Amino acid sequence: MRVGRPRRVSSHVLAAQLALVIGVTALVSGLFLAPLSDQLDRQAMRRALAIAQTTAARPELAAQLTAAAHAADRPTARGPLQTEAERVRRATGAEYVVIMDERGIRWSHPSPSALGHHVSTDPGEVLAGHDVTQIDEGTLGRSARGKVPLRDPDGRVVGAVSVGIDYANVREGLLALVPKLLMYAGGALAAGALAAYLLARRLRRRTHALAFSDISALLAEREAMLHGLAEGVVALDSGGRVRLVNDEAQRLLGLGPEALGRPVTEALGPGRTADVLTGRVTGRDLVTVRGTRVLVANRMPTADGGAVATLRDRTELERLGRELEGTRGLLDALRAQDHEHANRLHTLLGLLELGLYEEAAQFVTDALGVHRATAEEVTERVHDPLVSALLVGKSAVAAERGVALRLAPHSLLPDRLVDPGGLVTVVGNLVDNALDAAAGSADPAVEVELRGQDDRTVVLAVRDTGPGVPPEHRELVFEEGWSTKAAGPAADGPAHRGLGLALIRRFAQRAGGEVRVGTSPEGGAEFRVVLPEALVSDTGQRATEPARTGARA
């Protein structure tokens, strides 16, 4: 055992509860004894008064006292008043029964030597005709007293009867009740101590026998760790309410401190992110889109029915992945062109070796013409260099896969794009999906329509000859994680699929547009994207041209 080891939380709680139980028991006992003492005093005084009233009610006492006073007799130990008073005292167990005349002279007393003397306390009130009860000190010590006036048949006060009950008897009655009270208090104290002990044991198990200082240190460490993590952490209770959101999770999810205590579906709104956090969508490394961010989420249930979810930002990684996909597409296009170029060179070499020079010249002319025609067709209708270069490269990839990639006849896209890179991502994603869908069909083909509309709007449509999208799946295809493609390798498995169309919809919605899926004339799928405000106004562009010309001059 270490010296000075802090006491456990359970020990602190047990000590506090025991002190509370003992204090409450002592307080209740004191509150019980205080009125009990007063009640016993009143009971003793009422008993003394009752004895005095019963004694004074005997008519012969008033007659004997009046006769003795008129005859100028002196009180004696054998007088009738003394004899009667002693009989009543012995019969009732009183400490004394004193009969006094109207001057306050005793005619009876347990001690004969006190006969003929004035009473020790003021008899004025009782001789005035009033009953008196009190606790007072007299010649026989402290006693509970009851005094009653003694009246003759005419109702005139001729004396008084005073009865005293030994106060020691009253105190003994009170002390006799104390053991019972202590027994009951002890039983209550034992029950309270047992309950406190059981509660302390349970608390010890729940707190893992930690001390208060350990809990404070753990809390400080937890706060520092949670808010210092580069990953977002969201903790939910058993009711699905948010009970903790660290700084990174607030940034990734766009939440504030007001989210605490609210259901996660209310704080985030309906969608895949809320479904992942609540556990309606299960799995590891689940990909979801929140605003402009691509997140990877993992959820771990807790013993109390809640859960802790971690969130990683894959936005930059996803962007780099898209760029890598574009680079791969370009490499595939170059590889396809290299393969095609090698085949043409072999053909040309064979023609030259055979001495077919005119045929060789014609072959070169035709080959250059086809390639030039494809590039010229794209650049004539798509004036933006990034988008046109993408389509030229995709046409080579499509040709290698045996799919015809063509532009719709009425396609015309001016070189006034606000975000060329964004449109390149949308076009590349949709064309790749269309090539995958069309490959293997009877006459595989993909048609791309790109045109400006209303001076500011861009309309994009990609049609294929694949199997199409069933009506019941036309909304599901835009959800994060939903995909019809077979699972790839672990790093590119189903958890990482189904993002392309979701990101396209988010891109279109941020631009104020929309994405719809339908059926193409060839029976496959048609994805139509409308992007308002995607073009710089033609009027505004023309207004800036003179200034630019003047600046160059």
Image (spheres, grey):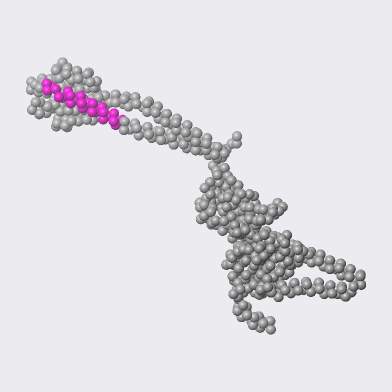
Instruction: Report x, y in % for residue 70.
Output: 7, 22
14 vs 109, left or right, is: right
Q: Quadrant of residue 189?
A: top left
Instruction: Report x, y in % for residue 421.
Output: 67, 67
Confirm whether the magenta stretch covers residue 42.
yes
The number of numbered discs placed on residues in the rendered structure image is 0
Q: Quadrant of residue 313?
A: bottom right
Confirm whether the magenta stretch covers residue 43.
yes
Instruction: Report x, y in % for residue 199.
Output: 49, 36
In-front residue for pair 318/122:
318
Q: Is residue 509 visible?
A: yes
Q: Is residue 156 above or below residue 213?
A: above
Q: Residue at x 86, y 67 (%)?
A: 346
Q: Main secondary structure of the magenta part?
A: helix
Q: Is residue 508 above or below residue 154?
A: below
Q: Quadrant of residue 376?
A: bottom right
The residue range painted magenta reads 37-61
Q: Is residue 277 visible?
A: no
The image quadrant where one finds the N terminus is top right
Q: Is residue 374 above or below residue 168?
A: below
Q: Residue at x 36, y 27 (%)?
A: 178
Q: Residue at x 26, y 27 (%)?
A: 44
Q: Residue at x 68, y 73 (%)?
A: 409
